[in-house]
Image (spheres, coloured by chain):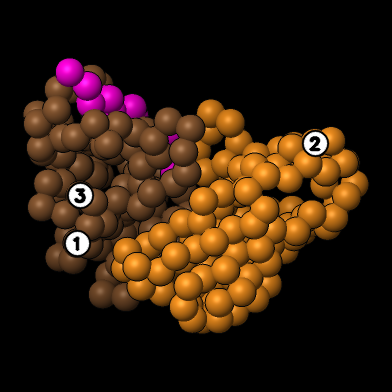
Amino acid sequence: QVQLVESGGGVVQPGRSLRLSCAASGFTFSRYAMHWVRQAPGKGLEWVTVISYDGSNKYYADSVKGRFTISRDNSKNTLYLQMNSLRAEDTAVYSCARGGGHCTNGVCYILDSWGQGTLVTVSS
Amino acid sequence: DIQMTQSPSSLSASVGDRVAITCQASQDISKYLNWYQQKPGKAPKLLIYDASNLETGVPSRFRGSGSGTDFTFTISSLQPEDIATYYCQQYDNFPITFGQGTRLEIK
């Protein structure tokens, strides 16, 4: 069965960096686009970024563009999110999700499997 | 950005009731809309994709309809296990955007 397990969250000071990982198993990771979605405490879902199955295409929400970088290592079945210049408003649970179904340029938009998420708290 | 407006924001209904949630897009998104269920403390789960297609393994009491700017998600007969927050999501254009969520409670 599809399994997505995030790690790397924690408490970090504003302006610092953090790298999240998402370990995938139960499917052919290299054939799927992957997304990061976040959820601030008590709030709704906010899409963050997506990477195509081969890493050639990446898209970001305006709120993180220029600060966050998505990447993947298909040999390790792992997705990453490098987060720099963190702000208090980045505090959230960050979840990775597999993108399936309708695809354009290797990016697929139906989030058909999700991880449980890892909490990132940005606070001094 | 395409704004997705869900209504109501919260809903209380009885077991066996028919429940409907609407999602309105700020511009035409064709059929590019999905619905997710998120139970407290759990990851979201895909229920409906491309506006009206039921994800494999999802009970048939869940249904989606609509196209263009107006979409509806219905539960034909509410069950206790359906207590959750429901989100719509558009993918016609980047950035992908979600509705603000509808919290469903049992009366």
User: Residue flagged by tag 2: what amino acid is it?
Assistant: Ile
The residue wearing badge 3 is A64
* Residue B84 percent coordinates (x, y): 65, 39
Which chain does the numbered disc 1 sit on? A
Disc 1 secondary structure class: strand
User: Does A105 lie within the magenta span?
Assistant: no
For the question of whether residue B81 can be seen, the reply is yes
Colour chosen for chain B: orange
* Residue B23 percent coordinates (x, y): 60, 64
Q: In the displayed structure, would residue A7 be above or below residue A71?
A: above
Label 2, label 1: how many angstroms apart (C-alpha)? Answer: 41 Å
Tag 3 and tag 1 share a subunit: yes
Q: Which residues are magenta?
A: A114-124
User: Residue flagged by tag 1: what amino acid is it?
Assistant: Lys
Disc 2 secondary structure class: strand
Label 2 environment density (alpha carbons within 10 Å; few <14, some 14–19, many ≥20): some
* Residue B45 percent coordinates (x, y): 55, 47
Question: Residue sitting at 61 percent across and 74 percent down?
Answer: B70
Look at the image and tell me in which quarter the C terminus of chain A lies: top left
* Corner quadrant of residue B38: top right
The residue wearing badge 1 is A58
Of mark 3 and mark 1, the one earlier in the sequence is: 1
Question: Residue sitting at 33 percent across and 59 percent down?
Answer: A32
Label 1 environment density (alpha carbons within 10 Å; few <14, some 14–19, many ≥20): some
The residue wearing badge 2 is B106
Q: In the displayed structure, would residue B79 be above or below residue A8?
A: below
